[in-house]
Image (cartoon, rainbow, N blue to C red):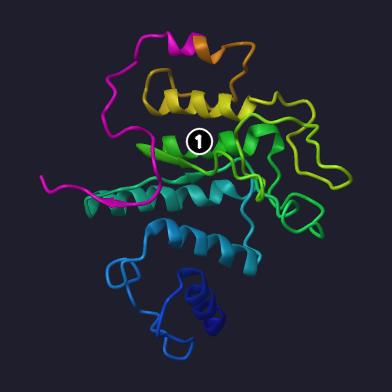
């Protein structure tokens, strides 16, 4: 197993002058090799698929303690932390032999649960993956459920979900993150509270400059 992990790290991070036999597992990839944290996130996803690590709506609650611990560690080390949130995942568009979504969207429940978990555990910024990643079935941008793709199958939103629903959920989560609207665990409804109406509400609390939907990864804080 250790050799296979080394092979994946070397391949995904494009490490030069190193082989699985010479790879040092104790190497600090960020500090010593300057590997970007986003690249490390990609490696985690690859390892998840390689070893069939389950990450979906049912298993997500078990990951919340990790988010909390990561946030605390980053604060102690003067780093900014942005947990990754995504609506679902599917290999089908890239690999037609994969017939079912690897991580079902559950009509936005999985997406919303991650927002709720990240914010409730103290996240001050969140990385949404991804805006337009169609190939891996993680796109949140507005799309049609009848794309002109001929005879091929294409992973689409659920038939009863509005085409802009994931954009709507992202917008509402952003307002919660910035404390412009109260925190809520229940999924919001476009009919019950349109995003335009939420945007017009006064701030619930002052907005800090380092809060919002920003780029993922960890960045070194400026010394105080």
**Residue at the extreme bottom of the image, as rendered:** 21
Q: Position of residue 208 (x, y in %)?
A: 26, 28
Give whichever of 89, 1 is nearer the camera.
Answer: 89
Left or right position of 189 against 102: left
Highlighted magenta segment, given as a residue range? 197-224
Query: Residue 97's image quarter?
Result: bottom right
* 193 sits left or right of 33 in the view: right
Q: Is residue 138 left or right of residue 25?
A: right
Q: Residue 53 in the image: state x and y as whole percent.
A: 62, 62
Who's the residue at 30% across and 54% down the image?
73
- Return the residue nearer the eye: 57 or 48: 48
Relative to 28, residue 121 above or below: above
Name the magenta segment's main secondary structure.
Answer: loop
Query: Which structural element holds mark 1?
Result: helix
Q: Is residue 84 above or below residue 211?
A: below
Task: Using the image as rendered, state which of residue 106 and residue 185 is in the foreground.
Answer: 106
The location of residue 65, given as percent across then percent down, is 45, 50
**Mark 1 Cα-neighbour bin, 10 Å: few <14, some 14–19, many ≥20:** many
Question: Which residue is most to the right?
Answer: 151
Where residue 57 sits: x, y (%)?
A: 64, 44
* Residue at (51% x, 11% y) in the render: 196
In magenta stretch: residue 209: yes
Locate the C terminus by quadrant: top left
**Residue at numbered disc 1:** 115
């Amino acid at each position: 197993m250790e050799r296979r992990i080394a092979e994946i790290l070397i391949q995904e991070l494009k490490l030069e002058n190193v082989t699985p036999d010479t790879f040092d597992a104790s190497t600090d990839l960020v500090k010593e090799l300057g590997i970007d944290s986003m690249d490390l996130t990609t490696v985690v996803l690859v390892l998840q698929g390689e070893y069939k690590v389950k990450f979906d709506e049912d298993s997500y609650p078990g990951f919340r303690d990790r988010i909390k611990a990561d946030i605390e560690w980053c604060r102690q080390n003067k780093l900014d932390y942005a947990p990754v949130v995504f609506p679902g995942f599917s290999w089908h568009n890239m690999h037609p032999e994969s017939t079912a979504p690897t991580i079902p969207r559950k009509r936005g429940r999985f997406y919303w649960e991650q927002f709720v978990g990240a914010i409730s555990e103290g996240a001050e910024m969140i990385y949404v993956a991804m805006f337009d990643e169609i190939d891996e079935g993680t796109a949140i941008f507005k799309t049609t459920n009848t794309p002109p793709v001929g005879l091929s199958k294409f992973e689409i939103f659920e038939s009863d979900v509005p085409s802009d629903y994931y954009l709507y959920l992202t917008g509402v989560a952003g307002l919660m993150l910035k404390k412009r609207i109260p925190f809520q665990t229940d999924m919001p409804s476009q009919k019950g509270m349109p995003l335009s109406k939420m945007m017009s509400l006064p701030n619930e609390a002052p907005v800090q400059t380092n809060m919002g939907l920003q780029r993922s990864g960890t960045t070194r804080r400026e010394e105080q």
